Image (cartoon, rainbow, N blue to C red):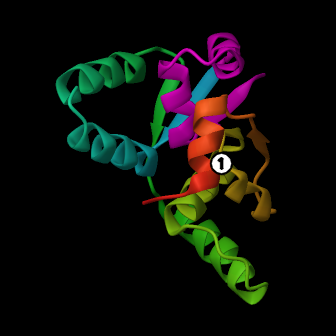
Amino acid sequence: MSRYCLDTSAYSQFKRGHAPVVALIDSAEWIGVPTIVLGELWLGFGLGDRAKRNERELQEFLANRVVDELPVSREVARLFGQMASSLRRRATPVPTNDIWIAATAANSGSILITYDEDFRRIDQVESLILAAPRALAKLLRRGPG
């Protein structure tokens, strides 16, 4: 059974029509979307100029029968603590939201789909890290700001 959990970057590239993630999502039997990802998406929508359209499209995506929102539960919080402490002991920085997303994916028993290399550092979750389209890869190399 193909069970996938989406990172923010995977949903964003899906909406841009990037073929590898579109194929995975279209063939999935189950897709989880962490509440943390929803927060990151709504942040982006609020900063953009197509907030209403993006929110409508997200609601339509979430209404699909194979898509479930994955809230933060006590078990997700426990996994987050284990992952975060392991990363800190190894002096391996990973953004906090990424650790929450990884904990949510691990708790759901799904493969995390992402374009973010940070997830390679989190041993406790299976991640499928897709190659970014050229424009995204260039932006990721350059970094924020």
Q: Is mark 1 on a helix, strand or loop?
A: loop
**What is the total number of numbered labels drawn onto the structure image?**
1
Q: Which residue is drawn at 32% across and 18% down?
A: 57
- Quadrant of residue 30 within the rendered picture: top right
In the picture, measured across the screen, residue 68 lies left or right of residue 117, that is: left
In the picture, measured across the screen, residue 12 lies left or right of residue 18, that is: left
Front residue of this view, candidates 124 and 113: 113
Q: Does the segment drawn in magenta span residue 115?
A: no
Front residue of this view, candidates 65 and 22: 22
Is 24 drawn above or below residue 89 in the view shown?
above
Residue 38 pos. (x, y %): 38, 42
In the picture, measured across the screen, residue 45 lies left or right of residue 143, that is: left
Front residue of this view, candidates 64 and 14: 14
Residue 94 pos. (x, y %): 63, 69
Q: Quadrant of the C terminus?
A: bottom left
Q: What stretch is highlighted in magenta?
A: 1-29
Q: Which residue is drawn at 81% across and 62% down?
A: 123
Q: What residue type is labelled 1?
A: Asp
Q: In which quarter of the image is the N terminus?
A: top right
Q: Residue at x 58, y 54 (%)?
A: 142
Label 1 environment density (alpha carbons within 10 Å; few <14, some 14–19, many ≥20): many
Q: Mark 1 points at which residue?
A: 116
Is 131 drawn above or below residue 109 in the view shown?
above
Is 86 drawn above or below residue 13 in the view shown?
below
Residue 92 pos. (x, y %): 73, 78
Q: Does the segment drawn in magenta span residue 8?
A: yes
- Quadrant of residue 24 within the rendered picture: top right
Residue 131 pos. (x, y %): 75, 34
In the picture, measured across the screen, residue 116 lies left or right of residue 95, that is: right
Q: Given the current orientation, which residue lies at the most extreme bottom position?
A: 89
